Image (cartoon, rainbow, N blue to C red):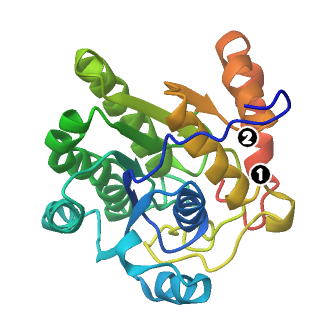
Amino acid sequence: MQKNEIKVSDFFQNKVLIITGASSGIGLATAFEAFVKNAKVVFAARNLDAVKSELQKKNIASEKYLLVKTDVAIESDCKNLIEQTIQKFGGIDILINNAGISMRAAFEDVELEVIKKLMDVNFWGTVYCCKYALPYLIKSKGSIAGVSSVAGFKGLPGRTGYSSSKFAMNGFLETLRLELFEKNVSVSIICPGYTSSNIRNTALNKEGKSQNESPLEESKLMSAEAVAKEILSAIENKKKFKVLTLMGNATFWLNKFFPKFIDRQALKLIKKETKSPI
């Protein structure tokens, strides 16, 4: 190799990668970033029309991908996702649990069904997919990743269901990491900060209906493509826990030593939102 030549990693070469919530935002960006790294990608999402359109535009060969209509809140859908993957590719190397929904409503106002729905998607969706993929990931000594959130280690006002589900997801994945340590399966928890995506538009209100608007200026947020690169880097380097964005890291560390200060800042931040839930 020449002195100034940069070695390109082949970590993802021909590896079978499943990503849930793959129809838009972080999920779709991560899937296409994985193609760049020569992975085989399984797209799991409730609506795959946007994915089909992107695949046609980029002229991706059909042997490189699989589309599986999947609602991760439904256990049988998650089981089918794994079965379809094995049927086409014969194994699984990487599972990225990305599917998720959010909410914006004060707990005193919210319908309890909203909290349950967030737990079903964000927490149980991760549990179901991991359960059915696990035998194949153990065989391949593969990788599991969970796309969590700053709200998964710091409770955010107006996001009781979202924070609770992400805290639960983090606890599940951290425990799973310990159980799989001697089986050489890596488990990564990645916590993006505010990212430009559709999650705020689809966030549920107190009645469980989509908000259809974002309280933030999306153009100023971290791009889904930048987050995708960070997710794949964390998996390749077997990072246990990775917080993205300066604000996210500041929240993580300051919350350990100055929790009252961070509480006040969190309240201020949420109260500045358009149609603040508190």
Q: Residue at x 21, y 68 (%)?
A: 88
The image quadrant of residue 258 is: top right
Q: Secondary structure at mark 1?
A: helix
Q: Secondary structure at mark 2?
A: helix
Q: As drawn, is 190 to the left or to the right of 43?
A: right
x, y percent for residue 86: 17, 60
Residue 156 visible here: no
Report crowding for label 2: few under 14, some 14 to 19, many 20 or more residues within 10 A (C-alpha).
some
Quadrant where the N terminus is found in the figure: top right
Q: Nearer the viewer, residue 272 or 133?
A: 133
Q: Which residue is mark 2?
A: 267
Q: Which mark is residue 53?
A: none
The image quadrant of residue 141 is: top left
Vertical arrangement, residue 80 with respect to residue 92, above or below:
below
Residue type at numbered disc 1: Lys
Q: Which residue is mark 1?
A: 271
Residue type at numbered disc 2: Leu
Q: Nearer the viewer, residue 82 or 189?
A: 82
Q: CA distance from mark 2 to mark 1?
A: 6 Å
Residue 180 visible here: yes
Vertical arrangement, residue 1 with respect to residue 43, above or below:
above
User: Exactly how many numbered labels are in the figure?
Assistant: 2
Report crowding for label 1: few under 14, some 14 to 19, many 20 or more residues within 10 A (C-alpha).
some
x, y percent for residue 100: 45, 59
Q: Residue at x 60, y 64 (%)?
A: 29
x, y percent for residue 32: 57, 66
Q: Residue at x 20, y 48 (%)?
A: 133
Q: Nearer the viewer, residue 177 or 117?
A: 177
Find out whether the residues at labels 2 and 1 contact each other: C-beta distance under 8 Å.
Answer: yes
